[in-house]
Structure formats: C-alpha cells, structure tokens
Image (cartoon, coloured by chain):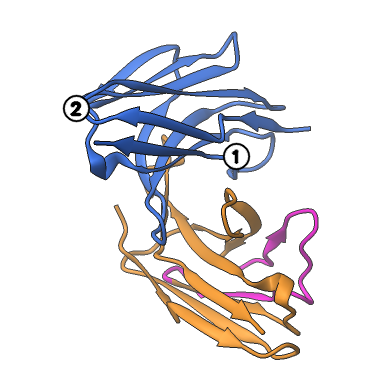
Chain colours: A orange, B blue
C-alpha cells in the first residue's frame, strides 16, 4: 500500500486566517480524497481530487472555503479558508489503491487543526 | 439517502470475542470495508467484502449479507490494543468511487 504523509501534523490558527494542508504520496495514484473528522465523529468526505481536473465537492462543502490543488499524481493540497472555530477538526487525505479491483483507500496521518 | 448504522460504543473483556454490526441502505453497492482507528491516529484498513460470506484474517473476520444490507466484524481473543474505533464504509454509489462511512463503534477492551 502507498505511504502517505501530511503537513502540518497539527496547527493552532486564529479566526479569519487560512491554512494549507499538504498530502504527499510515495507512488503515483489517480484518486485522492480529503476528509474531515470532527471530535468523536466518523469521517465526512469533503472532496475528491483527481489530477488534471477540478475537484468534486460533496454537499455542504464549497471551493471558496476549501480550495484544493492536485498538480500531479503524488501530491495534493487542501486549504481551509477564512477559518472559524467550527473548522476545528482533523483533516485527512486518502488515496485509492492502484489495484483498482477493490477501491481500497489508505489514509494519511491527518492534520489536527484548532481554530481560536 | 445513504445510511450506514453501527452501535456507538461496545465494551468487552480481554480474551473474549466481540461482534460489531453494520447495517447499510445505499443507492449502490460495490464493496464494504472495515477500518480500525486508534485515538489520534489515521484509520487503517482491516478488511473488504464484496461477496456474501465470511472473510477471515487472523483474529479478525468480516461477514457480509448483501440481501440484508448487513455486515459484521468479529474480533477473537481480544487484546487491550484492540481498544479503538471501528469504522464501516460502503463504496459503489453510482458514478463515484467514494466511500460513505458509518458512524463508527468505539470498542473498549477491559482487563
């Protein structure tokens, strides 16, 4: 399975600022996903990011708030814009196994964001 | 809509067997996944079921019944390190490759 790293691992930010989270994979992957996990909750998909196309956002998430870049097959960024305390959460990226027969996803270690 | 349900919390004793259930109602189905997530860590892949029946992997087994929209994760010979959240996820919604995650089950293993 792919090895996935995320930066930063955690951050504390002020209201109204923006934070860009990086996701790096050690192999080329087609499908990358960004999730949010609020304290004590399960994972909620923010968007699907494929290289060479615009990200596809889920209901309740918009590009102006969560712009995503996917410049190549090993890297993606998620920006949390104009942050408020409600954005405090863990943000995780995942990639789909290159063995497309199972659609298995593997997750990065996550970025723990606290907004004051 | 899409709905995946799991019990919120379960408690079991070290050495015992525990079964974590997952029921789903989704507009499509192409597979069901179980993930383990320790506090403060990323989810790690445990198992995948696409056909009815039982898949066994060491101390962990996962069962699927597509006609009933039902799966369970069976953990045998529980160890303290099995204390974690267990997440059920379904894939196969039409036109997408995305997962829909269940609510997650927090399992506490007691000595």
Secondary structure under tag 1 reads: loop
Percent x, y for residue B110? 30, 36
Q: How far from the left and from the top, in percent, is residue B66?
A: 55, 14
Q: Would you say residue B17 sits in the magenta stretch?
A: no
| Residue in the picture at 41% in, 70% down | A74
Q: Main secondary structure of the magenta part?
A: loop
Instruction: Measuring from the top left, give residue A8's x and y in whole percent.
Output: 45, 81
Disc 2 crowd, CA 10 A, few/some/many (<14, 14-19, 20+): few
The residue under the point 59% across, 63% down is A49
Secondary structure, mark 2, is loop
* B28 sits left or right of B7 in the view: right
Please state which of residues A75 and A40 is positioned toward the viewer in this rendering: A40
Q: Earlier in the sequence, mark 1 or mark 2?
A: 2
The residue shown at (20%, 26%) is B15
Is B43 located above or below residue B71 in the figure? below
Quadrant in which residue B78 is drawn = top left
The residues tagged by marks 1 and 2 sit, at their Cα atoms, a distance apart of: 25 Å
The residue labelled by disc 2 is B58
In-front residue for pair A87/B9:
B9
Could you tell me which chain the residue with mark 1 belongs to? Answer: B
Q: Quadrant of residue B72?
A: top left
Frontmost of labels 1 and 2 is 1
- Give the vertical position of B3 relative to A46 (above or below): above
User: Which chain's residue wears label 2?
Assistant: B
Residue, disc 1: B103
The stretch in magenta equals A51-74
Mark 1 surroundings: few (<14), some (14-19) or many (≥20) residues within 10 A: many
């Amino acid at each position: 399975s792919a090895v996935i790293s995320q930066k930063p691992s955690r951050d504390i930010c002020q209201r109204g600022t923006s934070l860009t989270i990086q996701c790096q994979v050690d192999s080329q992957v087609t499908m990358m996903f960004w999730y949010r996990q609020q304290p004590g909750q399960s994972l909620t998909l923010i968007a699907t990011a494929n290289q060479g196309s615009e990200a596809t956002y889920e209901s309740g998430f918009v590009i102006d708030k969560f712009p995503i870049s996917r410049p190549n097959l090993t890297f993606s960024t998620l920006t949390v814009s104009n942050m408020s305390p409600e954005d405090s959460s863990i943000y995780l990226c995942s990639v789909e196994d290159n063995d497309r027969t199972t659609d298995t996803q593997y997750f990065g270690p996550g970025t723990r964001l606290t907004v004051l | 809509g899409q709905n995946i349900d799991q019990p919120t919390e379960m408690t079991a004793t070290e050495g015992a067997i525990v079964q974590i259930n997952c029921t789903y109602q989704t507009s499509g189905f192409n597979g069901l996944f179980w993930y383990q997530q320790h506090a403060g860590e990323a989810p790690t892949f445990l198992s995948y079921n696409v056909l009815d029946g039982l898949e066994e992997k060491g101390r962990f087994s996962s069962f699927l019944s597509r006609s009933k929209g039902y799966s369970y994760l069976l953990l045998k010979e529980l160890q303290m390190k099995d204390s974690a959240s267990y997440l059920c996820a379904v894939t196969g919604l039409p036109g997408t490759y995305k997962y829909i995650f269940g609510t997650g089950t927090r399992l506490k293993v007691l000595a």
